[in-house]
Each structure stands twice: as structure tokens, then as C-alpha cells.
Image (cartoon, rainbow, N blue to C red):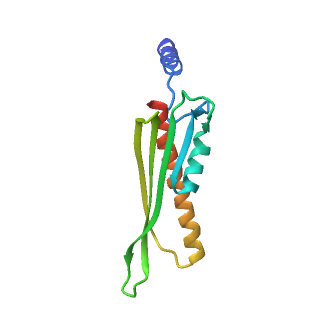
């Protein structure tokens, strides 16, 4: 019985299993040029979180193009015309280009629906929190895409 337990522990510990979302060494991605379009705040958070670096001295590197868009939509109103629920959407397009040819392109999209709050200040704070959470999800998805691709 002890041998079976020992072998079981040995195989599960030494199998090299590592979660796919775990990034032990923060990988730096270098590009000759980083172009951003759309929502500048979202693009800067993505660039800083994933450690995109611009190195304009090395012309052999690829070019990164980030285009982001964020909006909050009113999805339901009551009989008085007051908004009862919203939907936040984030859309990011990532393109990696070598000279004039696109070698990688992917769209990342997330959305979240939520009810309104009575206090406007609380509503604004909640909307900012939702925006940050959606950005984090997109960053996670981009990171997985770049590390697996």
C-alpha cells in the first residue's frame, strides 16, 4: 500500500503540470513600433500589464497595433423613463504586422450587464470597477493568446 501511495505522489508531483494561466516569468514582448487607436486609457493599461516594449532601433521586430473601444449602453427603462439596467462592452483588436503584412490578428470582446444604483456616485464607481474588471479579462485573454500562439 505504501508503494502505491509513493508512486502516486511521485507521478503527480513530477509530471510537470503547470496551470495555463500561470505566468511565472513575466515575458516581455518587443516591437519596433506600437500604434494605439481608440480608447487610450484601455490601451495603456494593456501595454503596461503585458509588458509590451517599443524598440525602434531593431527593424527586424514586428509592429503592434492596438485598437480598443468601450461603451456603456442603457438596456432597460421603467415607465417613468428612468434607466434600470446597463450593459458595458469592451472590444479590443490586436494586430501584429511584419512590414506591411499582418501576421497575427485577433479580436477580444467582453460585456457585462448590471442594474442601476440609486446613488449616482455609487453608480459611477461601480461602472469604473466593471470597466477595470473587463479590461483585466481582456488582458488575460491577450496574454493567453500571445503565450500559446
- Image location of residue 97, percent across then percent down: 45, 36
Q: Where is residue 83 in the image (x, y as percent from the top left)?
A: 43, 78
Front residue (pair 16, 35): 35
The answer to whether residue 3 is left or right of residue 53 is left
Quadrant where the C terminus is found in the figure:
top left
- Residue at left 56%, top 29%? 59
Using the image, determine if residue 108 lies above or below residue 122. Answer: above
The residue positioned 47% from the left and 43% from the top of the image is 141
What residue is drawn where x is 51% and y is 21%? 16
Residue 28 found in image quarter: top right
Q: Position of residue 17 (x, y in %)?
A: 49, 25
Residue pictured at 62% horizontal, 45% vertical: 48
Give the total number of marks visible in the rendering: 0
Task: Give residue 128's quadrant in the image.
Answer: bottom right
Q: Is residue 143 above or below residue 14?
A: below
Observer-nearest residue: 76 or 38?
38
Q: In the current view of this chain or complex, which residue is farthest to the bottom? A: 80
Residue 35: x and y in percent read: 53, 45
- Identify whether 94 is placed above or below 80: above
Q: Nearer the viewer, residue 5 or 10?
A: 10
Amino acid at each position: 500500500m505504501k508503494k502505491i501511495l509513493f508512486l502516486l505522489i511521485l507521478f503527480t508531483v513530477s509530471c510537470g503540470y503547470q496551470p495555463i494561466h500561470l505566468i511565472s516569468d513575466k515575458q516581455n514582448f518587443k516591437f519596433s513600433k506600437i500604434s494605439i487607436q481608440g480608447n487610450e486609457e484601455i490601451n495603456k493599461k494593456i501595454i503596461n500589464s503585458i509588458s509590451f516594449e517599443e524598440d525602434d532601433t531593431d527593424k527586424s521586430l514586428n509592429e503592434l497595433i492596438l485598437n480598443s473601444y468601450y461603451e456603456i449602453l442603457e438596456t432597460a427603462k421603467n415607465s417613468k423613463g428612468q434607466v434600470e439596467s446597463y450593459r458595458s462592452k469592451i472590444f479590443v483588436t490586436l494586430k501584429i504586422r511584419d512590414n506591411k503584412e499582418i501576421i497575427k490578428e485577433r479580436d477580444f470582446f467582453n460585456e457585462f450587464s448590471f442594474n442601476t444604483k440609486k446613488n449616482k456616485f455609487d453608480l459611477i464607481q461601480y461602472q469604473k470597477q466593471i470597466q477595470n474588471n473587463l479590461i483585466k479579462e481582456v488582458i488575460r485573454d491577450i496574454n493567453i493568446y500571445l503565450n500559446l500562439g
